[in-house]
Image (tube, rainbow, N blue to C red):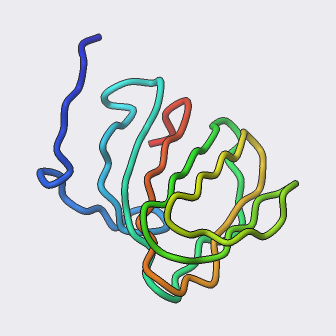
Amino acid sequence: MKGIFRNESDIKISEEGPFPSKTLLSKRDTPTASVKIGSLPVGGKIEVHSHKDVNQLEYYIKGKATLFLEGVGEKEIRPGTFMFAPKGVKHGIHSVTEELIIYCVFTPALF
């Protein structure tokens, strides 16, 4: 496998999934991980869910909301917040009061 270089500005926004996002890395590139960056608008919500076969990591670049993470409870999301949900751990986002910019990584690749 060779390295991959992409510029976010060259990638089209996809409306698939729980929020509009740009896929930076996918199963087509490698089975190791998938990566996307996107935004969740004020009033948006990601229902509580889990992923049976993948770990999920999120870094919140901008915005404010509330995160539910099984075993941790509800926590405030603000710029610089990081979340790790291992396989099978329930998680979701609600009460978005400022648009969230979310950087997501799934291992192994989810999409």
Q: Quarter of the image holding residue 70? A: bottom right
User: Which one is in front, 51 or 59?
Assistant: 59
Asked where in the image residue 30 lies, by quadrant, the reply is top left
* Rendered position, 15 above or below 104: below
- Measuring 64% from the left and 79% from the top, which residue is drawn there? 94
What is the residue that sits farthest to the left in this orientation? Answer: 10
Q: Residue at x 36, y 37 (%)?
A: 26
- Taking depth in this image into account, of 14 and 76 the one nearest to the observer is 76
Q: Is residue 24 above or below residue 20?
A: above
Judged left or right of residue 49, residue 60 is left
Residue 36 place in picture, x, y as percent = 38, 49
Q: Position of residue 108 (x, y in %)?
A: 54, 29
Quadrant holding the N terminus = top left
How many labels were placed on the picture?
Answer: 0
Residue found at x 32% / y 48%: 23
Q: Is residue 71 left or right of residue 106?
A: right
Tell which residue pokes out farthest to the front in this image.
80
Q: Is residue 86 left or right of residue 44?
A: right
For the C terminus, the image quarter is top left
Residue 42 pos. (x, y %):
47, 86
Q: Is residue 44 left or right of residue 23?
A: right
Tell me: residue 4, above or below residue 11.
Answer: above
Residue closer to the observer: 43 or 27: 43
Find residue 85 and report its horizontal and vertical position in percent: 70, 47
**Residue at 67%, 66% in the rendered image:** 92
Q: Nearer the viewer, residue 84 or 88?
A: 84
**Residue ranking furthest to the top:** 1
